[in-house]
């Protein structure tokens, strides 16, 4: 539950807390009931040697820094592979099934080249999380030809093929693969420390490596709590927190979270964190889109003027600002609601239109309603050309329809008379906080009531966020 809160939002909506808690308890209950099945048995409780705060804490800190750097490289590699596939830079990667089957075949071939590669993640975690490896934990598998060499190969293999697999257009997880890779790297680092200075905490290095690597990739700190729950051992809490904090700091300074990259590439409503150097020095006027680029409509406009506005490219707007005769902002209405309202008004009046005109208008309004915002400019013919072509044959009914005023009291419009707006001098920190807490998609910037511009979520990305 803590991980879900941390990874999904900076400011958590409190009324979602009980839902997350209920789901977590249900999941844990089902997991405990299935624990008799070896498939659901992920880890056994560990029991490490007594831990003392001494010079070895420095080696845990170094491990955290290394995991942070490796995690950042992994995120950049994964992001680059997904970017190449989505932007068709390599033709082979654009074929969904061919690319996915090729990756699966390549992973299978590489996996079965060595015995330690064929082990499941839970078996590898059980092996690496032990200070003193007992029989039955795959000890023999890792000793041929050399344990340290095998751990190095496995870490590189796991991270590389996790990135390649994540670039395929199918659902897959990122937490357990990076967790396992971090465990193997931590064990390898423990062997290096043992060969240089000697240590009895090989399992602790593995656990800390797993948490630090995952923290670097996902940019979360709650993974440390998850590890404490998995292992049932808290002797190494201080070393764990030091390494995870350093891994988080290094990963955060070198790359964005893997989830943030995916949000950005999929064009999801993702609000990036604004750099502190900008959030305290800039104001709303520094990132707004100016009023001359804003599609707006006056409150006394006719249906004809509304259709002209809806024909334009409105892909950057979720709502249209409504102005009065003095260019003052008096409200807003959703673009989809405006389109739905215009079509419904046409349907009610179209029975009185001449048949030839009605056929052309039917096709026009059908395209206007069904098209995406980015395709509106392609609609032919436009309302202007329709009005000119029909001429006198359109009849007074059609002319009256086009000249009809917009009924802002219609339930279809959901007209908002109090849209969220800020002044030009509003600090960027406050604007960013409003987007976070209120879940805004856009807000307006005004000067003495007049519309100056608007700010959307992508405004933060385009201005150094």
Image: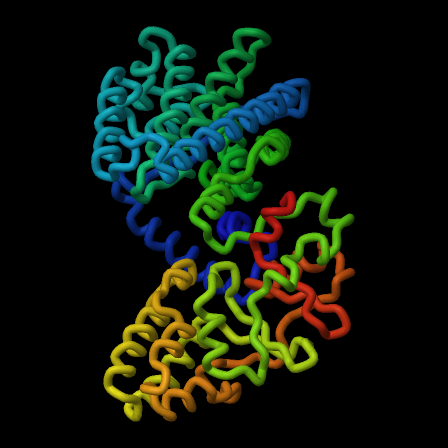
Q: Quadrant of the C terminus?
A: top right
Q: Position of residue 83 (x, y in %)?
A: 42, 36
**59 sits to left or right of 191:** right
Q: Position of residue 276 (x, y in %)?
A: 72, 44
Write the residue at 29% across / 48% down. 34
Residue 324 found in image quarter: bottom right
Q: Position of residue 378 (x, y in %)?
A: 37, 60
Q: Can you say whether 275 is above or below 65 in the image?
A: below
Residue toward you, 86 or 42? 86
Write the residue at 31% across / 87% down. 350
**72 sits to left or right of 180:** right
Residue sitting farthest toward the front: 392
Q: Can you say whether 370 is above or below 64 in the image?
A: below
Residue toward you, 132 or 223? 223
Q: How many marks?
A: 0
Residue 381 found in image quarter: bottom left
Residue toward you, 386 or 418? 386
Write the residue at 60% across / 56% down. 11
Residue toward you, 268 or 179? 268
Q: Position of residue 136 (x, y in %)?
A: 30, 23
Regarding residue 172, the answer to whether it shows in the image is yes
Write the residue at 47% across / 87% down. 403
**12 sits to left or right of 384:** right
């Amino acid at each position: 539950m803590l991980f879900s809160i941390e990874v999904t939002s900076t400011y958590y909506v409190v009324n979602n807390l009980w839902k997350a808690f209920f789901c977590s308890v249900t999941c844990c209950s089902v997991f405990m009931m299935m624990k008799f099945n070896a498939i659901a048995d992920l880890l056994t409780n560990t029991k490490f040697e007594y831990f003392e705060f001494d010079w070895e804490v420095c080696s845990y800190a170094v491990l955290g820094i290394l995991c942070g750097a490796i995690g950042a490289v992994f995120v950049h590699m994964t992001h680059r592979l997904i970017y190449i596939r989505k932007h068709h830079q390599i033709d082979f990667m654009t074929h969904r099934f061919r690319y996915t089957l090729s990756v699966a075949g390549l992973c299978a071939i590489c996996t079965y080249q060595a015995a330690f590669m064929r082990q499941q993640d839970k078996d590898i975690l059980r092996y690496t999380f032990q200070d003193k490896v007992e029989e039955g934990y795959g000890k023999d598998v890792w000793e041929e030809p050399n344990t340290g060499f095998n751990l190095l190969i496995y870490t590189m293999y796991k991270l590389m093929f996790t990135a390649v697999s994540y670039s395929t257009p199918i659902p897959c997880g990122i937490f357990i693969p990076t967790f396992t890779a971090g465990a193997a790297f931590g064990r390898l680092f423990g062997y290096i420390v043992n060969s240089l200075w000697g240590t009895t905490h090989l399992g602790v290095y593995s656990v800390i490596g797993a948490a630090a690597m995952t923290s670097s990739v996902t940019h979360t700190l709650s993974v440390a709590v998850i590890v404490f729950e998995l292992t049932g051992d808290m002797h190494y809490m201080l070393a764990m927190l030091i390494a995870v904090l350093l891994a988080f700091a290094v990963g955060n300074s070198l790359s964005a979270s893997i989830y943030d990259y995916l949000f950005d590439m999929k064009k999801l409503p993702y609000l990036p964190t604004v750099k502190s150097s900008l959030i305290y020095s800039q104001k709303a006027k520094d990132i707004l889109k100016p009023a001359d680029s804003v599609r707006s409509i006056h409150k006394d406009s006719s249906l004809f003027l509304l259709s002209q506005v809806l024909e334009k490219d409105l892909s950057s707007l979720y709502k249209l600002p409504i102005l009065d005769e003095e260019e003052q902002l008096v409200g807003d209405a959703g673009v989809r609601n405006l389109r739905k309202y215009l079509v419904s008004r046409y349907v009610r009046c179209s029975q009185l239109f001449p048949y030839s005109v009605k056929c052309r208008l039917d096709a026009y309004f059908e395209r206007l309603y069904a098209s995406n915002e980015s395709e509106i400019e392609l609609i032919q013919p436009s309302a202007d050309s329709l009005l000119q072509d029909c001429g006198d044959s359109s009849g007074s009914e059609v002319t009256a329809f086009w000249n009809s005023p917009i009924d802002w009291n219609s339930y279809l419009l959901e007209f908002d008379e109090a849209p969220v707006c800020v002044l030009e001098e509003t600090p960027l920190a406050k604007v960013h906080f409003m987007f976070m807490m209120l879940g805004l998609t856009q807000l307006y910037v005004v000067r003495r009531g007049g519309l100056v511009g608007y700010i959307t979520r992508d405004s933060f990305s385009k201005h150094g966020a």
